[in-house]
Amino acid sequence: MSLSSSLLWRGLIAIVIGVVSVAWPGITVGAFVILFAVYAFMAAAMETLRAFSSTRVGPVFGYLLLAVLSLIAGIVALAWPGITALVLVVWVGSWAVITGVVEVALGFRRGESAGERTMWAITGLVSLGFGIVLFIRPDIGAVSLATVFGLFSIFYGTSAVVLSTQTRKVEAAANKLIDSAA
């Protein structure tokens, strides 16, 4: 899959998730908690499989420890969804800050057009701001977070779709250059 296709699909999925999050924030919070639990259970299963496919003792213990921690995280998510929602607020805040810093940094790469650099920088600053707000005001609640996350996802998805069209043009030009050189 090409970079432009990856960006396009990531953008479209983000837009759909954003629309759903804005339309049904309460359901979205419940879905986040359930999805996290499912992810944790899947991670536990994968780590268990890795443990028994390893040929050395050290990695076996590490993978089994990760499997147990993932299993516990999944059980806690289902047993205490309120605490899980708060932890997800902190997790999303951390993700947004890290993503924002990386995207701002990507805006300063060489070889990008001014529009691409600006789009990376703006998207990164919005992500960074979103994460900082979540750390400053975690009391906004998971339902408010779902709405804000939805709006953020719509913005992020739209920027990814725009970047995918620009990347597609660059890929087409590069392929044309490669074909003419051959």
Image: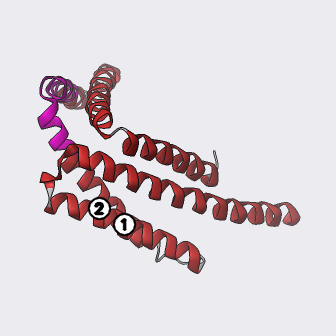
Quarter of the rendering containing residue 85:
top left
Q: Residue at x 50, y 53 (%)?
A: 157
118 is within the stretch colored magenta: no
**Left or right: 50, with 180 as reference point:** left
Residue type, numbered disc 2: Phe
> Could you say which disc has been placed on residue 1 in the image?
none
* Total labels drawn: 2
Q: Would you say the magenta stretch is mainly helix, strand or loop?
A: helix
Stretch of the chain drawn in magenta:
67-88
Is residue 55 positioned above or below 96 on the image?
Answer: above
- Nearest to the observer: residue 151 or residue 87: 151
Q: Which residue is nearer to you in this view: 72 or 78? A: 78
175 and 119: which one is in front?
119
Q: What residue is rendered at 19% in x and 24% in y?
A: 78
| Magenta-drawn stretch contains 69 | yes
Q: Position of residue 176 (x, y in %)?
A: 82, 63
Picture quarter with the C terminus: bottom right
Secondary element at image label 1: helix
Task: Identify the residue at image location x=29%, y=61%.
Answer: 130
Q: In this view, does 110 lie to the left or right of 58?
A: right
Regarding mark 2 in the picture, which secondary structure is present there?
Answer: helix
Left or right: 99 as drawn, with respect to 80: right
The quadrant of the picture occupied by the N terminus is top right
Alpha-carbon neighbours of circle 2 within 10 Å: few (<14), some, or many (≥20)?
many
Image coords of residue 72 (percent x, y):
15, 25
Q: Is residue 21 above or below residue 102?
A: above
Residue corresponding to mark 2: 130
Q: Are marks 1 and 2 in contact (CB under 8 Å)?
A: yes
Where residue 139 appears, as percent x and y from the top left, is 12, 52
Q: Which mark is residue 126?
A: 1
Q: Could you tell me which residue is drawn at 33 percent across and 67 percent down?
A: 101
